[in-house]
Image: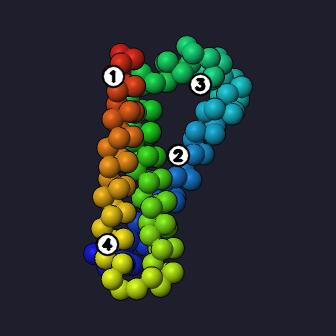
Amino acid sequence: MKESNFWSWHILAAVVILVLLTLHMGVMHLDNLLLALGYGYEDVLSYKSVFERSKTVYYLVLYLILLGAALYHGLYGFRSMLLELRIGRKLEKPISIIIPIGGFALFIYGAYAIIVGFTSLGG
């Protein structure tokens, strides 16, 4: 894949993060407004509210997408910064291999934690 395609995915991941974090901020910090509109939870930080949110497929999917977008965006940016250091051609390829493998491993670990939390709560 061309470097410009990776950059496009990087920008798309930033947009996804922006949208999902906006939703998160709305649910978590505009709870009184949402409650007045008939949505939301009574007390967003109470155990009951956290438990109810964690059982929904909506939050499972939201957290998985946010995890993937944040990992890609952060690790691609980190890779880009390392390559801009002009560390030599010999290290560019290993860096371009190790970072995606590490990102994939972190995604598997994070997804496992999200899915275990979802299934153990009866989702």
Q: Amino acid at mark 4?
A: Pro
- Residue plotted at (58% across, 39% down): 24
Give the mark, 1 or 2, whose residue is nearer the N terminus.
2
Give the mark, 2 or 4, whose residue is nearer the N terminus.
2
Of residues 80 and 95, which is closer to you in this image?
A: 95
Asked if 60 appears above or below 53 in the picture, the reply is below
Give the mark, 4 or 3, whose residue is nearer the N terminus.
3
Image quarter in which the C terminus is found: top left
Mark closer to the observer (3, 2): 2
Quarter of the image for residue 36 reads top right
Left of 112 or right of it: where is 82? right
Do residues under tags 4 and 1 come within 8 Å of each other at their CB atoms? no
Circle 3: element type:
loop
Question: Circle 2 sits on which residue?
Answer: 20
| Residue 11 in sight here | no
Asked if 46 appears above or below 84 in the picture, the reply is above
- Residue plotted at (42% across, 58% down): 72
